[in-house]
């Protein structure tokens, strides 16, 4: 007896019974792994060439298979591909369709290959592509932030610790903080790419391939740095995917903090920023409302990025080597994280570009609440007082100012000298917002010159 069993599975020969429809639905991954089709085709083309080099396909057979794969690719691109869920996944759908197109020679393509090394390959090819796009998208977010920072160079704002006004900052310095976070994110993705870029194909199901495949040549053909070194590891390894999800989770955390800052600044209590109508929504009941929904959702989607990382970590935990069907569960979290990243990358640059910063409000707030008290202490330090004593003295000055309901600049020199004889007339220049900013000129500080250097 030969040929596929009545239910048409590629493993039909071993089976007499048909799968239960519920089991068939349950095991199918076609619903989500179909998005890997371009990579599955790319891998299959390269595998066919490797089979040809190994003498397992004649040049004519190779040409037939490549032609067949092109036709399959055209159907997939055009949306006319006849997907068959009973064929479980994208790999078997493409392989069966190839046989429709190319005839029996199509049945030679899977020689020495397993879906286990095939799916590991597809995921790596997919991620290589995705990471390139994310890097470009992150560069755009950085550009949007840098543009806003350049436009507002010189605008002071209060900086916070514990969400209490702490010291004056330049708005540009605050915006640039996010640029540097995103720079690390880009580095993390690039670093992850180094481990993505290893060829698993040619590992077979788990033990390696039994045919004389030149895996170095195959790696070169697919643009990988090198072939994997251990077949068992290669089909079981999803570290590269976890690293991607980890980098995505950290990036999401950065975005969530940016979104949180902006939504806070948009509250009337702050009044530092206004979202444009194009990136806000109203309320179905309160006519006056303007809600920063886009920013809130950017913050909210971060939770999914964490969840996806945890989902795959939990799936892989304790799995015996090598491939287990549990690993099919890696794809939905991966795709979901990619979708979230792409969605946020699409909306963040235009949202940032459309923000209106209220410079007056920020400037006014920057100098309030004794935000230059540290500068007053630093003034005493410059006159020779040990910092700890200066801190104590200025603590007393601030308490006096609070009790008499005045700002530091509103105290007279006579009052100040009651706290320390080191205070002189030049003290008032030292505690202006501008002086406070200017003083922080060391590398990485908020001084206008330092920020200008950082911008450059
Ligand atoms: N659809 C499978 C996955 O996503 C492909 C590999 C299946 N291998 C197997 N032996 N069942 O992981």
Image (tube, rainbow, N blue to C red):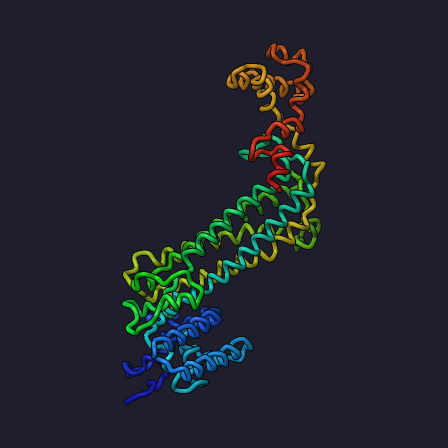
Quadrant in which the N terminus is drawn:
bottom left
Q: On the picture, is 156 further left or further right than 113?
A: right
Q: Where is residue 168 in the image (x, y as percent from the top left)?
A: 62, 31
Quadrant in the picture for residue 220: bottom left
Q: Position of residue 75 (x, y in %)?
A: 52, 79
Q: Which residue is drawn at 70% across and 51% down?
A: 287
- Looking at this view, is 354 or 49 the one in front? 49
Residue farthest along the right direction in this orientation: 360
Q: Residue at x 58, y 24 (%)?
A: 374
Look at the picture and state if 275 lies above or below 339. Answer: above
Quadrant in the picture for residue 441: top right
Quadrant in which the C terminus is drawn:
top right
Quadrant in the picture for residue 48: bottom left
Q: Where is residue 88 in the image (x, y as percent from the top left)?
A: 40, 75
Look at the picture and state if 444 lies above or below 128. Answer: above
Q: Where is residue 70 in the image (x, y as percent from the top left)?
A: 49, 79
């Amino acid at each position: 007896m030969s040929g596929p069993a009545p239910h048409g599975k590629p493993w039909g020969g071993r089976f007499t019974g048909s799968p239960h429809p519920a089991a068939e639905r349950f095991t199918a991954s076609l619903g989500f792994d179909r998005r890997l089709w371009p990579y599955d085709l790319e891998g299959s083309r390269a595998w066919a060439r490797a089979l040809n080099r190994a003498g397992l396909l004649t040049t004519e057979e190779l040409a037939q298979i490549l032609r067949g794969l092109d036709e399959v690719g055209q159907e997939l691109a055009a949306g006319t591909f006849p997907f068959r869920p009973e064929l479980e996944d994208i790999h078997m759908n493409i392989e069966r369709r190839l046989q429709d197109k190319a005839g029996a020679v199509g049945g030679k393509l899977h020689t020495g290959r397993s879906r286990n090394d095939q799916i590991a390959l597809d995921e790596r090819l997919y991620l290589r592509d995705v990471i390139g796009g994310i890097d470009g998208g992150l560069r755009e977010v950085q550009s949007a932030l840098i543009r806003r920072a350049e436009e507002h160079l010189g605008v002071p704002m209060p900086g916070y610790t514990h969400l209490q006004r702490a010291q004056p900052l330049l708005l540009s310095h605050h915006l640039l903080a996010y640029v540097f976070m995103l720079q690390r994110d880009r580095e993390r993705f690039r670093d992850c790419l180094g481990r993505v870029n290893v060829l698993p194909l040619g590992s077979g199901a788990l033990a390696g391939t039994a045919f004389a495949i030149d895996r170095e040549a195959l790696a070169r053909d697919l643009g990988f740095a090198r072939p994997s070194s251990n077949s068992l590891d290669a089909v079981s390894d999803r570290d590269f995917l976890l690293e991607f999800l980890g980098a995505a989770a950290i990036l999401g955390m950065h975005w969530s903090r940016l979104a949180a800052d902006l939504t806070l600044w948009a509250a009337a209590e702050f009044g530092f920023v206004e979202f444009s109508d194009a990136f806000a929504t109203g309320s179905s009941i309160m006519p006056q409302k303007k809600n920063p929904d886009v920013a809130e959702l950017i913050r909210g989607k971060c939770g999914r990025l964490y969840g996806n990382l945890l989902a795959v970590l939990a799936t892989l935990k304790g799995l015996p080597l090598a491939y287990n069907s549990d690993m099919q569960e890696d794809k939905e979290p991966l795709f979901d994280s990619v979708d979230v990243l792409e969605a946020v990358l699409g909306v963040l640059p235009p949202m940032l570009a459309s923000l209106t910063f209220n410079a007056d409000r920020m400037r006014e707030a920057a100098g309030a609440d004794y935000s230059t008290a540290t500068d007053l202490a630093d003034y005493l330090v410059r006159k020779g007082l040990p910092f700890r004593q200066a801190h104590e003295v200025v603590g007393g000055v601030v308490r006096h100012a609070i009790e008499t309901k005045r700002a530091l600049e509103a105290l007279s020199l006579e009052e100040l000298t009651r706290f320390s004889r080191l205070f002189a007339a030049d003290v008032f220049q030292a505690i202006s917002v501008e002086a406070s900013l200017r003083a922080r000129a060391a590398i990485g500080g908020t001084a206008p010159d330092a920020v200008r250097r950082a911008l450059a």
